Image: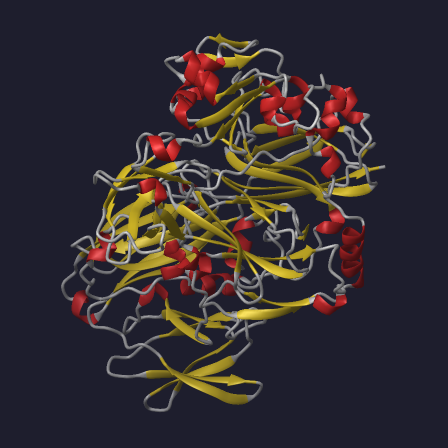
């Protein structure tokens, strides 16, 4: 996850971008997956809960912070249901500090917090044979990993004895808590490790027996060009000389394959593998997995170039930022990226960084160090981690259970209770669920005795209007009440936690200054109140509010839609001045080109439904508009020029604002339907920034106190490995930290920072 900053204000927004990747190779997951993001307090109570879908690789979110939230430390966590069940180490955690100018609590009094480490409790000592098994009569490499219950490395030493009380091996871990030793097991003998810590015997651990029917994949040596592997067999298999198959994979593709009989050696060319971590799999004659081994094939080689047009800027100035990502040969590398530009004081190095401090030169090395970042590893420590990072294998693969073969289709379950006006349950009632905004949704259920219903795996976004419908006659569905339940309780935290305290006086002072200056509270620069000074001011009658229906602007109301009796919503909008079709794109004349210069690529306007930017499919704006039933529209407003600037850079082509709602006589006319808005997939709004390319906006009298002056969570490099953005500086003098994060198509993590000055 990439967070824009780690200090925020109550009532503000936490901007973030997630990267859901395969754990083994870090390749981005493209299949649709439901992802949950929570903002929780110290008691693990959820403050904000968002649901996202990863299918479009745009896991971007804007987490709302309640205005009345108490100041102090909170935790951001991101996870899938699969991680909660089977892979807690894949869950993302990061603490954030929330300020509140209305609170009298001092920063010093709330400078500590309890936060999850993101690791499930582990055994303190792990002893793991290479390739999963011990084999009698040959040298076996065995890894030793030593951690405390918080997952931190613990230096230990020990010896290995057999059941004759003879010492057959010894070992000693370094500061990183890992090492290896060599053991040559003898048939019928048993072995145990005697662990000492601080000079005293700490514990004894029995080593696994060497099974009679096991394969072992081991790496005997490597040099600059090759990896040398050995296929070992247990006593029973050795006499049968079975066939086995070896597959080497890296970054999601097969890089090597071989087959052999009995015990044999294999030379594996390194040139076939990209830099990073490779994994080898050994299969038996029945093509069942019998042994596996990871190996580190070298430093990753992506070059990231992050540049601005200048180093020093004045207030409200334009900054041009360019990004180039290539490999060592200068070839373009596709990458998904996010970028934040934040007052450097609001991104301190403290307690737990929101994104690992990956080295540009050694992403793979630091991938091995995920349990203890910022430390160098020896070759032995790397090897022990690779041997230890291995899933257990069964000698006889277990039969797959029904749950193993179930395909988890992403979606949101809409569930709750139907109640009558007197709060009695609507029991045993067949009902249907449908949405006219998304025509592919039509679901059915029958309530139980308590009125409970459940519609599973619906795919829809926030602000989607749904209707519950009953075919039963004489049912006044409009009088029913819907009590919705949510899925906030999906998360169960079984991980360990640690107490973090911030004692750095400069950090505490920065938080005080942030709160005192009321940073990020540029409300007067974020509304149309000051835009009215630079646009044609609408008139309204005395005593009436200046809402969209009362302004002389491009408005179509429900009544007008009904009188026009047009065949589609798009045809109605095309009757407004300045709305034209260019090719097959609906276009608003008078719109401004966006600061990202995207207008030339896409001429269609931004569509905002009930305050949320709409997610437009490949059919374009016209098809999206035609999906609405005019009966469910309160009004449509078309914004062009300065008024559209409220919606930031994506408003360069104009904005179509749609306000949905049911007519006042809805219940009497259609009393067999009940409308409601369940929580859907989150769709992040556009990050707002004043458009200082407009002279009147740049000269307007308001204070721009933003600490995050730019955020973009949906960047992607082009065919040349490049991308560019533009943004504007704020009013306070400061040093801004530009942070670029992302993931390449090869699974390499991108992390690059640059500073600029606002003088």
Residue 692: quadrant of the picture: top right
**Foreground of the two, 462 or 342:** 462
Residue at image location 20% in from the left, 58% down from the top:
400
List x then y, in percent, for residue 486.
41, 53
Residue 329 appears left or right of 343: left
In this rendering, position of residue 104 left or right of residue 566: right
Quarter of the image where the C terminus is located: top right
Q: Specify the farthest residue to the right.
A: 759
Residue displayed at 48% across by 82% down: 158
Rendered view: 480 above or below 213: above
The one of 47 and 629 positioned closer to us in this rendering:
629
Q: Is residue 570 visible?
A: yes
Q: How many marks?
A: 0
| Residue that sits furthest to the left in the current view | 240
**Which color scheme did the rendering employ for the protein?**
secondary structure
- For the residue pair 422 and 547, the one nearer the viewer reads as 422
Q: Is residue 437 above or below residue 706?
A: above
Residue 142 image offset from top left, x and y in percent: 40, 70
Position of residue 719 in the picture relative to residue 711 (left or right): left
Q: Is residue 253 visible?
A: no
Q: Nearer the viewer, residue 757 or 700?
A: 700
Q: Looking at the image, is 31 positioned above or below residue 243?
A: above
Relative image position of residue 195 (x, y in whole percent): 47, 83
Q: Position of residue 745 (x, y in %)?
A: 46, 37
């Amino acid at each position: 996850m990439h967070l824009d900053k780690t200090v925020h204000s109550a009532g503000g927004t936490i901007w973030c971008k997630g990267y859901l990747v395969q754990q083994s190779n870090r390749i981005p997951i493209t299949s649709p997956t439901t992802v949950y993001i929570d903002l929780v307090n110290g008691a693990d109570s959820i403050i904000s809960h968002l649901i996202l879908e990863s299918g479009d690789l745009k896991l971007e979110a804007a987490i709302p912070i309640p205005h009345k939230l108490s100041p102090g430390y909170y935790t951001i966590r991101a996870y899938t249901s699969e991680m909660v069940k089977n892979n807690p180490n894949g869950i993302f955690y990061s603490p954030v500090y929330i300020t509140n100018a209305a609170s009298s609590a001092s920063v010093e009094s709330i400078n500590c917090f309890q936060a999850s480490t993101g690791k499930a409790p582990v055994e303190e000592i792990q002893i793991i044979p290479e390739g999963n098994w011990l084999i009698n009569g040959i040298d076996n490499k065995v890894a030793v990993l030593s951690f405390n219950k918080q997952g931190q490395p613990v230096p230990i030493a020990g010896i290995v004895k057999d059941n004759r009380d003879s010492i057959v091996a010894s070992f000693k871990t370094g500061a990183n808590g890992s090492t290896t030793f060599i053991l040559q097991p003898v048939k019928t003998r048993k072995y145990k490790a005697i662990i000492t810590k601080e000079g005293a015997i700490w514990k004894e651990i029995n080593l696994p027996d060497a099974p009679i029917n096991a394969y072992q994949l081991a790496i005997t040596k490597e040099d600059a060009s090759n990896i040398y592997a050995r296929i070992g067999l247990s006593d029973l298999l050795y006499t049968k000389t079975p066939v086995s198959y070896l597959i080497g994979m890296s970054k999601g593709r097969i890089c090597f394959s071989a087959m052999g009989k009995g015990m044999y050696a294999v030379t594996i060319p390194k040139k076939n593998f990209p830099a990073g971590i490779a994994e080898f799999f050994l299969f038996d004659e029945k093509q069942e997995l019998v042994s596996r081994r990871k190996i580190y094939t070298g430093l990753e080689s992506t070059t990231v170039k992050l540049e601005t047009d200048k180093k020093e800027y004045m207030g409200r100035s334009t900054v041009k930022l360019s990004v180039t990502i290539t490999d060592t040969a200068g070839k373009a590398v596709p990458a998904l990226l996010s970028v934040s530009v934040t007052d450097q004081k609001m991104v301190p190095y403290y307690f737990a960084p929101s994104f690992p401090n990956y080295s540009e030169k050694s992403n793979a090395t630091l991938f091995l160090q995920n349990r203890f970042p910022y430390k160098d590893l020896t070759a032995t420590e790397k090897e022990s981690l690779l041997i230890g990072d291995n899933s257990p294998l069964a000698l006889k693969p277990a039969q797959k259970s029904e749950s193993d073969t179930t395909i988890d289709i992403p979606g949101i379950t809409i569930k709750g209770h139907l109640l009558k006006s007197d709060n009695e349950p609507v029991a045993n009632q067949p009902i249907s669920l449908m949405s006219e905004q998304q025509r592919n949704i039509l679901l059915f259920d029958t309530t139980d005795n308590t009125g409970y219903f459940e519609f599973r795996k619906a795919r829809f976004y926030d602000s989607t209007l749904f209707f519950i419908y009953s075919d039963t006659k004489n049912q006044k569905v409009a009088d029913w009440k819907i009590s919705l339940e949510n899925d906030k309780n999906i998360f169960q935290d079984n991980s360990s936690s640690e107490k973090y305290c911030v004692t750095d006086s400069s950090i505490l002072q920065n938080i005080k200054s942030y709160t005192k200056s009321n940073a990020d509270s540029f409300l007067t620069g974020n509304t149309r109140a000051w835009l009215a000074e630079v646009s044609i001011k609408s008139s309204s009658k005395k005593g009436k509010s200046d809402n969209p229906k009362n302004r002389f602007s491009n408005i179509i109301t429900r009544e007008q839609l009904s009188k026009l009796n047009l065949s589609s919503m798009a045809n109605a909008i095309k009757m407004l001045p300045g709305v034209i079709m260019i090719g097959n794109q609906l276009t608003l004349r008078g719109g401004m080109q966006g600061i990202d210069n995207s207008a030339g690529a896409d001429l269609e306007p931004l569509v905002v439904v009930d305050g949320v930017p709409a997610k437009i499919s490949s059919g374009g704006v016209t098809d999206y508009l035609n999906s609405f039933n005019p009966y469910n529209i309160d009004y449509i407003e078309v914004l062009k020029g300065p008024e559209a600037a409220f919606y930031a850079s994506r408003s360069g082509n104009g904005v179509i604002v749609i306000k949905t709602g049911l007519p006042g006589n809805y219940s009497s006319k259609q009393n067999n339907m009940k409308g409601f808005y369940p929580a859907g997939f989150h769709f992040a709004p556009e990050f707002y920034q004043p458009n200082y390319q407009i002279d009147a906006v740049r000269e307007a009298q308001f204070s721009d106190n933003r600490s995050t002056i730019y955020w973009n969570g949906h960047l992607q490099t082009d065919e040349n490995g490049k991308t560019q953005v533009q943004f504007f500086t704020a009013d306070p003098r400061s040093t801004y930290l530009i942070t670029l994060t992302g993931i390449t198509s090869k699974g390499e993590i991108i992390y690059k920072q640059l500073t600029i000055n606002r003088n």
